[in-house]
Amino acid sequence: DPETTCYIRVYNVYVRMNGSEIQYKILTQKEDDCDEL
């Protein structure tokens, strides 16, 4: 059987506050085939 890879995608969201650009890292979208250990 093929090995199932479990991983979490990292989304970089850029939000402008007070004219400054701040980068936020959001950890979401866990693979459906992944079993929580």
Image (cartoon, grey):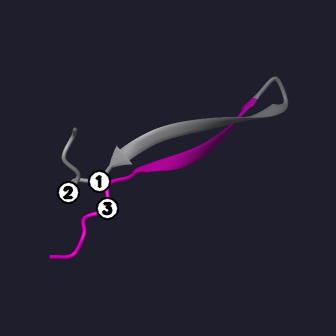
x, y percentage for residue 10?
52, 48
Judged by depth in the image, the label closer to the viewer, 3 or 2, is 3
Tell me if residue 7 is in the magenta stretch: yes
Task: Assign a secondary structure to mark 2.
Answer: loop
The label shown at residue 31 is 1
Asked if the residue at tag 1 contacts the one at tag 3, i.e. Cβ–Cβ closer than 8 Å, the answer is yes
Tell me which residue sits at (59%, 38%) in the image. Answer: 25
- Type of amino acid under label 2: Asp
Span colored in magenta:
1-16
Q: Mark 3 points at which residue?
A: 5
Q: Earlier in the sequence, mark 3 or mark 1?
A: 3
Tell me which residue sits at (32%, 55%) in the image. Answer: 6
Left or right, residue 2 beside residue 15: left
Q: How crowded is mark 2: few (under 14 residues within 10 Å), some or many (20 or more)?
A: few
x, y percentage for residue 29?
36, 47
Q: Which of marks 3 and 2 is nearer the N terminus?
A: 3
- Type of amino acid under label 1: Glu
- Type of amino acid under label 3: Thr
Q: Mark 2 points at which residue?
A: 33
Whole-angstrom CA distance, mark 3 to mark 1, is: 8 Å
